[in-house]
């Protein structure tokens, strides 16, 4: 059967500054990497800071019509209140390079990393945090606006809460600090709303959203009331809490899907679904979860959805093509059932610095040899290109 996407559908890949640029020296992550509180160091990453033009050429070569990147607050405001014009000009150049290539741009304003000065004041637990964020957004809105199609204020606010305040694996390494985890979700929601208003005031035709990590929680025993209740509670915290607070103050939702997780009275972590295929990180590959989370978020919020991330660690590229087809088939099914989905951006364009896992996981459509910085287009990138160029594919169950 033919799976056909609507005309004008956005296709491409996503990146994030700290993971690809290199030398993000004024950020909390860089500091943690030096201290050894995270086990790996990002170093010069993919040197995308200087190689962005040829990387964007490759994105176009493999058919992409859209691209998502993040601008780095720690570069733009390295010292509180001091904005670096050279860095702002750099991002204007990067975004102009997208426009020169005809790429639709998705620009994330906060993708996990914070300026060190901001982290030193308590990060998102600080009452002043939303105001600091709003000032940064106000400062860059004008210069960047001519080149931005979609603004995304925050990337996965609940991941920041989970990794930084519950598991403690990411800066600031708080563990089981549930009240703080909730507070920082709420602070980021407030910061989003302030930024949303500021962007609309300064850039009247701005389209502004955020991204959310949608976890497809599933009760191990659907007949058990406890399992079902736990599923509802977890779904609320990961998938709804931030969006509920934002309310109507968003123009789109960036849906990111990686995980289907089984729950009983407690979650069973990724890898627990024994029949599912797994990525190199042991994460279960469950394409139907794409349908579940997208339809759920559509029914609850009725906002245009762009899939701003979805992907897997697959170093030998043996599963990525099938992964793409199966997830896109499920996304399409959600659209057939009414979800207003406007685009699909794969994670990621390039292999990159996978946070606390370092450089081992390979998420790229394009592989990177970190010794030579040589890029090679993976076969799955060509398969994705064929999908994009025909705006669909033939699907066999
Ligand atoms: C994040 C990316 C990350 C990817 C794979 C998402 O949660 O936005 O930065 O690399 O997942 O783990």
Image: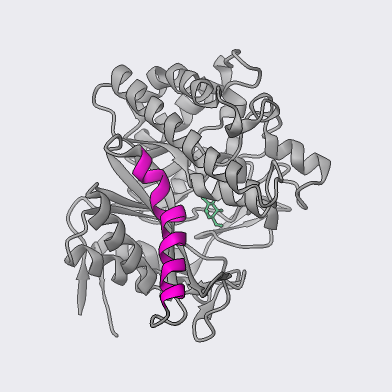
Extent of the magenta region: 225-245
Q: Which image quarter: residue 23? A: top right
Look at 49% across and 28% down and name the residue there.
Answer: 91
Vertical comparison of 10 with 296: above or below: above
Residue 233 horizontal/vertical position (percent): 44, 60
Q: Position of residue 103 (x, y in %)?
A: 34, 41
Quarter that holds the N terminus: bottom left
Image x and y of residue 175, in percent: 70, 50
Q: On screen, 35 above or below 361? A: above
Instruction: Report whether residue 208 is seen.
Output: yes
Q: Is residue 220 left or right of residue 113?
A: left
Farthest residue in the right direction? Answer: 35
Where is 342 relative to 280, above or below?
Answer: above
The foreground one among 379 and 256 is 256
Say which quarter of the image contains residue 245.
top left
- Which residue is outermost to the front? 225
């Amino acid at each position: 059967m033919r799976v056909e996407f609507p005309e004008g559908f956005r296709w491409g890949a996503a990146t994030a500054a700290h993971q690809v640029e290199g030398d993000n020296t004024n950020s909390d992550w860089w500091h943690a990497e030096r201290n050894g509180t995270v086990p790996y160091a990002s170093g010069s990453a993919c040197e995308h800071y200087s190689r962005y033009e040829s990387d964007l050429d490759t994105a176009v070569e493999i058919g992409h019509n859209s691209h998502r990147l993040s601008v780095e607050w720690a570069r733009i405001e390295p010292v509180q209140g001091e904005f670096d014009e050279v860095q702002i000009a750099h991002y204007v150049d990067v975004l102009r390079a997208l426009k020169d290539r005809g790429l639709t741009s998705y620009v994330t304003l906060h993708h996990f990393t914070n300026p060190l000065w901001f982290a030193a004041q308590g990060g998102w637990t600080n009452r002043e945090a939303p105001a600091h964020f709003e000032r940064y957004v106000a400062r860059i809105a004008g210069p960047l606006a001519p080149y931005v199609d979609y603004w995304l204020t925050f990337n996965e606010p609940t991941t920041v809460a989970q990794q930084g305040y519950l598991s403690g694996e990411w800066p600031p390494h708080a563990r089981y600090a549930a009240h703080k985890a909730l507070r920082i979700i709420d602070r980021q929601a407030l910061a989003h709303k302030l930024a949303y208003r500021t962007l609309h005031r300064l850039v009247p035709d701005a389209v502004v959203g955020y991204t959310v990590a949608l976890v497809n929680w599933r009760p191990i025993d659907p007949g058990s009331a406890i399992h079902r209740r736990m599923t509802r509670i977890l779904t609320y915290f990961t998938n709804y809490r931030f969006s509920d607070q934002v309310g109507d103050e968003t123009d789109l939702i960036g849906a990111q899907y990686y995980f289907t997780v089984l729950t009983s009275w407690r979650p069973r972590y990724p890898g627990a679904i024994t029949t599912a295929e797994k990525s190199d990180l042991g994460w279960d590959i469950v394409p139907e979860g794409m349908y579940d989370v997208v339809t759920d978020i559509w029914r609850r919020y009725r906002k245009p959805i762009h899939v701003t991330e979805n992907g897997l660690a697959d170093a030998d590229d043996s599963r990525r093509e099938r992964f793409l087809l199966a997830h896109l088939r499920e996304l399409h099914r959600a659209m057939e059932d009414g979800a207003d989905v406007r685009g699909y951006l794969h994670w990621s364009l390039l292999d990159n610095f996978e946070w606390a896992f370092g450089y081992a996981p390979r998420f790229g459509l394009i592989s990177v040899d970190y010794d030579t910085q040589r890029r090679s287009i993976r076969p799955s990138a060509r398969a994705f290109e064929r999908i994009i160029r025909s705006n669909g594919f033939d699907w066999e169950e």
